[in-house]
Amino acid sequence: MPTKTIHQETIQRPSLPARGFSREALESLSARRNEPAWMLENRYQGWRDYQELEPPLWRRTDIKALDWGQLIPFAPDQAAVSDLQALPPKLHDALSVYGRRAGLLIQRDSAPVYMDLADELRAQGVLWTDMSTAVLEYPELVQDYFMTEAVPASTDKYTALHAAFWSGGTFLYVPEGLSIELPFVSVLWQEMPELAVFPHTLLVVGARSEVTLVSELLSMGCEACPNTYHGGVTELYVGAGAQVRYVNAQDLGRHVYDLRSQTALLDRDSHLDWLSVTLGGRVSRSSQHSVLRGPGGEAYVTGLYLPDGKQHIAMDTLQDHVAGNCLSDLLYQGALLGKSRSVYEGTIRAWPGAQKTNAYQSNRNLLLSKRARADSIPQLEIEANDLRCTHGATVSHVDQDQVFYLMSRGIPRPDAVRLIVEGFFQPSLDRLPPSLEGLKERLTGAIATKLRG
Amino acid sequence: MSADLSIKNLHVSVEGQEILKGLDLEINRGEIHAIMGPNGSGKSTLANALMGHPAYEVTEGEIWFKGQNIVEVPPDERARLGLFLAFQYPSSVPGVSVANFLRTAMNARRGNAKAGSNGKSPGGGISLREFRKELKEKMALLKMDFGFAQRYVNEGFSGGEKKRMEILQMAMLEPEIAVLDETDSGLDIDALRIVSEGVNELMSPNLGVLVITHYQRILNYIKPQYVHILVAGRIVMSGGPDLALELEERGYDWVRETEGS
């Protein structure tokens, strides 16, 4: 049985920090976390980068309505819970799909409130904790991997802001040669309106190890709430010969602006299966980059998105073939309702010398409303000459013959359309292993709920 | 007393072109009718118009079923009333399993249209246990492997598998009037026998069947009491089972000549 570890022994209830981002605010955040000087220096550097960098030029994604000066840079800590029953009902329900697990970490707003880790994994040297604790307890590892290679702080203005104000997040380190069948689960519950949350996910997997990590971003649905911000960064280090499955699912409220950068670095002969699901947020813009830096690496990348109403979901993927003899296979598929919009920008890059590359990219969009719009912008940057590379994008409507076929069996039109769209997503969801059957059912249910409107 | 299905002076246009030009037909439960006709005579138009395909516009006439003229009734409602069409070219529905599809359809047919499609039936539809039992029985009837239930609807199915899938749906949904649109096309003799035996097993005083076909072959297996010949959008001849044999022997030109004289 997993054991429970409560991390915050004393709970303080300080007043809210002032709105807006400043040097003083980051110093206050760092002091509250008792951070060492090197991390404070990291934050200073992030803050300097943030002030120097221009906002990225996004021609199709507009976040002007987000007033940065109104955001609260971090939240006071939450009381830890020892009993999952004490959590908000929606969060508690979400957790109920996870049966046996290797470890569970729950974060509310800026700080962790619950975590557990299977005893035998702890004994085998697996490190699983919230990011702030990792800074204090495993400083060498964090210094090696935190915003150094995968997502450097200066990547863009928002990653720089993340470096300055990151709060909470997930740290998982798996030593070499361990095969862990049960999933690690990390859930962020974002609840305070106008708050900016910057969780940092850092996964380091040693050579030949196998691990599954699920990262969920959830919040109350809150159409009328003032703008709230999520600025997450995810860094995955997949060691030589390691096999990693990473699932990130975002179902944030409609008041949340969600800007996320996610990068995986794959060493030789490693294998990554990465599913990214985007359902929520007012505006969501996420990157999903896979860098194949050792020969024999394989990245299977799947993205699934379903905006409705006035939601805007933008995604940028990179299949970066630095080394030769690697495979990347990407499928991004979305269905769009209402007046929603999606923007998919996908790049396959093969560096000079990345021979024998196999790279596939496919983006499929299903428009379920006349007023929805899907843009697809594929790009190839090929500097090797011996490779196989395909890419394709489609934007289509639901097939009316399929609808008629289902209706001819007594199924009403809205249910027929829903069934067809669920079927459209099914192959992506089928990639989830049996240990995540519960999550698959919940995602299927969440998709059905959105389609019912 | 009018027939269970009564088609009166039916005119149907496709893309502005009139295909059916005043078709009359009456079918009762317990009866098997065959409509035979050459290519382009309007056979598939009749099938699609009966089921309410939006591309087939009824410009004149009536279709009476269960006490109402269903010309303006949407296809899903027709199906729930007890009308069934076995498609000549059924659509595939990728990602939707045969079991999920059939259970959703059965719940809809049995008045639980709101029931969920992902294994739950909040509307109190058929229980999973009951459903599986029934599905197993009906699949055995059609000599289908139960593993079939987990495949995606018609995705990658052979011609024979598609037709069996259509009859399986008919078996599960228990319609009152079933239209088989060229169910024999693309079937080898073994598949034709299995499909036909399946239909014969399903025959009862509660089921009326309309077999639409170009060739007489299927009528060796599914024996109609009534045979109608469709030429250029109208039924030009009706008779007993012998008419099909005579037609097979003499060809459609004979009908045209007889009609013309």
Image (tube, grey):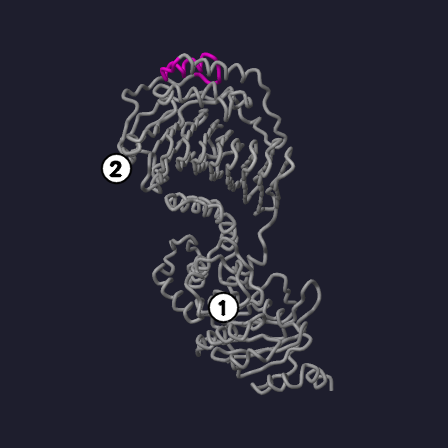
Q: Name the element at disc 2.
A: loop
Which residues lie in the magenta part?
A18-36
Nearer the observer, A20 or A126: A126
Q: Is residue A206 visible?
A: yes
Q: Which mark is residue B164?
A: 1
Q: Name the element at disc 1.
A: helix
Circle 1: residue type: Arg
Circle 2: residue type: Met
Which image quadrant is residue A104 in?
A: top left
Q: Is residue B94 above or below residue A208?
A: below
Q: Is residue A399 left or right of residue A217?
A: right
Q: Is residue B151 above or below residue A261?
A: below
Q: Is residue B231 left or right of residue A114?
A: right
Which of the two discs, 1 and 2, sits closer to the camera?
2
Residue at image mark 2: A1
Residue A352 forms part of the magenta stretch: no
Nearer the observer, A114 or B113: A114
Q: Residue at x 63, y 69 (%)?
A: B45
Image quadrant holding the N terminus of chain A, namely top left
